[in-house]
Amino acid sequence: MSILIRGARPLGGTATDVLVDDGAIAGIGSGLSGDEVIDAGGLVLLPGLVDLHTHLREPGREDAETVATGSAAAALGGYTAVHAMANTDPVADTAEIVTQVARLGDRAGLVEVRPVGAVSKRLAGEELAEIGTMARSAARVRIFSDDGRCVADSRLMRRALEYVKPFGAAVAQHAQDPRLADGTACCHEGEVSGRLGLPGWPGVAEESVVARDVMLAEHTGSRLHVCHVSTAGTVEVIRWAKARGIDVTAEVTPHHLLLTCDLLAGYDPVFKVNPPLRPEEDVTALREALADGTIDAVATDHAPHADHDKDHAFADAAFGMLGLQTALAVVAEALVATGRLDWAGVADRMSVRPARIGRVAGQGGAIEVGAAANLVLVDPDASWTLEAADVVSRSRNTPYLGRALPARVVATLFRGRPTVRDGKLVNGLAP
């Protein structure tokens, strides 16, 4: 069945009609017709969003999230592909487990689920995981990460970079020196942590690891990806590395683009994330780095947690917050509303570059005839409020409940099939 998207504005440009048929864009322009029509007058048409950093929790923590519920949250947020991180139980450190995760994604059928393989066995940081077999598996793993834990051992990190190179894969580093930011650190080290009496996490714990890793990437000639950049100092290291021609890419989360450590004053554990929220000057540096391309991509670090893990005193609560359903709106508030990015820039940072970094074929492509119809329609002028009933994740740890947000996702098409219409999951697709 063909679908005519009538009056959409590709990348925020001039309105036109777009015909989708058999999973691809079949025509662009006037005089087109389809079996079904989506009225997109005034809406911006973007390539489907691609997330490099999603925690789907399955297998092992289905009380917090499943591949199906996380896929639903992703579709509602305008995503058509997500990368599922490896810190599951059991850890995704073998071909069998990454293939299982990919099949669960296929079964849900809402987004393309690309598993991320662990760098080290059991995330222990001692012995390389089965990188080659995961890369050659049906899951086609092209990103490897121990996210949640830093690959602190320099020799192991060097070996990982060497092992992924023949596959064109990347090592995605959670940059946190465990000697500078140990297991007790729970917020940014500075005036706020001192006033609240909380153990601090200094920016140099991130920056020093990134400095080491870009030198290892240069030495090995391999691909390094820096997860959830959070400090102005890390931005400068990445900018220096790119100027030297080192093959390094980086991501920033929506919450690090909008929220600051001042929000910790009430000890609300919803604001406890890793890396921690930073001061305003770091937020400004991150926005500028995303706008000028030093930081390549926005990645949600969607981290669902059950109430019994998150609802504790701040120091004892689990790290992380939800991100998939609200990411586009937060980026619109932080970057589009402030004039740092236009909608073409949003597409580049949230779809084109993430797809390129993850080596995801058929995602993040140009809106042109013959391209795969992974698309999202956005109302750029909308103002909406996230209510608890709107959250489809199995967890509720989001800081945006009750907050007015801009730029609402109206429709998402995955491989030419609508998964979201009028801001709701299509009937029969709910997890």
Image (cartoon, rainbow, N blue to C red):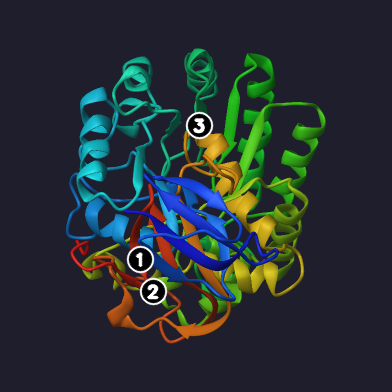
Residue furthest toward the front? Answer: 31
Q: CA distance from mark 2 to mark 3?
A: 29 Å
- The residue nearer to you, when weighing 266 against 9, is 9
Mark 2 vs mark 3, foreground winner is: 2
Under mark 1, the amino acid is: Val
Which residue is found at the position 39% from the left and 74% from the top?
423
Q: Name the residue type under label 3.
A: Arg
Q: Tell me where residue 302 appears, x and y as whole percent.
A: 40, 57
The Cα atoms of the two marked residues, 1 and 2, are separated by 6 Å
Q: Residue at x 70, y 75 (%)?
A: 337
Read off the residue under disc 3.
359
- The answer to whether residue 81 is above or below residue 272 is above
- Left or right: 91 in relation to 54: left
Which of the marked residues, 2 or 3, is nearer the chain's N terminus? 3
Q: Which residue is mark 1?
A: 420
Q: Nearer the viewer, mark 3 or mark 1?
A: 1
Residue 375, x across and y down, in percent: 48, 55
From the top left corner, tell me how far across and down residue 275 is, in percent.
Answer: 52, 55
Q: Is residue 223 in view from this perspective?
A: yes
Residue 300 in view: no
* Tag 1 and tag 2, C-beta contact below 8 Å: yes
Secondary structure at badge 1 equals strand
Crowding at label 1, few (<14), some or many (≥20) Cα neighbours within 10 Å? many
Query: Across the whole image, how many numbered discs are drawn on residues?
Result: 3
Name the residue beneath numbered marker 2. Answer: 423
Query: Looking at the image, which is closer to me, 199 or 101?
Result: 101
